[in-house]
Amino acid sequence: MVVKDKKALAYFPGCSLHSTANDFSKSIKLLMEILEIELKEIEDWCCCGASSAHRINQHLANGLVKLNIDQCKKMGLDTIFAPCAACFNRFKVVVSELGDTTKIVSLPDLISKHLEEIKIKQKLKLNMKIACYYGCLLNKPHSIFKQDCENPMTMEQSLTELGMESIEWPFKTECCGASFSLSNPEVVYQLTGEILRKAQQRGAEIIVTSCPLCHVNLDMRQKEIIKRNNDITEIPVLYLSELIAICVGIPIDKLKIDAHFIQVSKTFEEKFTVCHG
Amino acid sequence: MSKCMESECNSYVVKCYQCGKCSAGCQISPFMDYLPHQVVRFVQLGDIYVDKILQSKSIWYCAGCQTCFSRCPQQVNLPHLMDLLCERSSKLKKIHPEARKILAFHKSFLNGVNRFGRSFELGLVGEFKLRTFNLFQDLLLAPAMIFKGKICFLPAKIKNLALVKVLFKKS
């Protein structure tokens, strides 16, 4: 039996997970329950300001993150789990600037850390070619993350361990256009179009991501992108937590996958096969 | 520029030797009027050149993806430099006409945070549309988003809003 340190994590959902990414939030809660990881939502958390505050007001941007870190400390916790990549990045940057000892973890880190447990609980594996998409904010800048920011492999390594196949592709850390989704969708159509095209050229049948901003651009904006580019076809985009949740036996209909704009195919469930230890 | 911000900007750009690696890898560069390494060059030259940059599209179109910073052989924190220039450009009201909608987005977003402590997306979209007179953009997406339960109709207000308000006041 694997002994894990089961200290509770301070959970910072961020604004997206309470609204547009409530599907992401649902899958995380169910998955953490199965993995017996206790999440304590940071009491009365406030928005971390991503990705607007740091653009026009440095003092405010750092101050908002600091408020949440202080709140976490009041709860006696030392590790913050921020599933949204934009929030995660802001926390990482501010903690590094302040020289604070609070640890910040992302979803791919957490999955990779608890991989042994996931393997024990794993029931199914997905038989599709998966493109792992990190986006810009999970591994960059290099000065803070000190890891391979051009070709991160955390998600691929976890999926390989779980018996699934991921593709090699050069666009896994390219920018999707992030918050331009509202202020200038043309930028998103261009950038996200390139990402979808490259994933499909490399044979991906499904994209897995762990950022709600990327998900909005890859999923909600996808139909418009297809209209503009006839070489791109529909491709479902799952959150990493949704995929792992299905693998450890959470029924698909308990997750909110039908809230995605690009629906998974009717035969999606048949693509999962039983996993034998 | 204010002395403090000027010295911060200079501390970033002084190391740059204009290799152009930032511009070569910048995905947003097709939308920019000056390439990232040119922005740095103008800041190096100072005075009237900085003014040119404060009025440019480039600083607002930077997505802050951190690619240039990660690849820079001199570790020039270009995304942060862009942030500082945007802050300055916004304070001096020198915003490029094509970048006004980007600033409108940031302002609408932060207004929500100031009011409730968290972002309120429906309010954000409403305010953004009013600020930009762009009432019809993405209107067709709205019914699907409501149907899928992706829109909250009421903002979530935090209890300790006073602390957030103090931050907004100070800055």
Image (cartoon, rainbow, N blue to C red):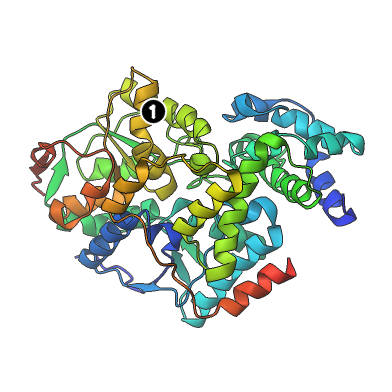
Residue at left offset 20%, top offset 55%? A255
**Residue A159 left/right relative to B121:** left
**Residue B87 left/right relative to B48:** left
Secondary structure type for disc 1 = helix
Q: How many marks?
A: 1
Give whichever of B54, A272 is nearer the camera.
B54
How many residues crowd around disc 1 within 10 Å: few (fewer than 14), some, or many (20 or more)?
many
Residue A245 shows up from this direction: yes
Residue at left offset 44%, top offset 25%? A194
Amino acid type at image mark 1: Ile
Label 1 belongs to which residue?
A225
Residue A101 shows up from this direction: no
Residue at left offset 34%, top offset 25%? A226
Give whichever of B158, B39 is nearer the camera.
B158
Q: Quadrant of the N terminus of chain A?
A: bottom left
Q: Position of residue B130 (x, y in %)?
A: 56, 50
Q: Which residue is at the far right?
A: B47
Residue at left offset 69%, top offset 47%? B83
Chain to which mark 1 belongs: A
Q: Can you say whether B21 is above or below A211 in the image?
A: above
Give whichever of A89, A223 is nearer the camera.
A223
Q: Position of residue A113 (x, y in %)?
A: 34, 57
Q: Position of residue A204 (x, y in %)?
A: 28, 28
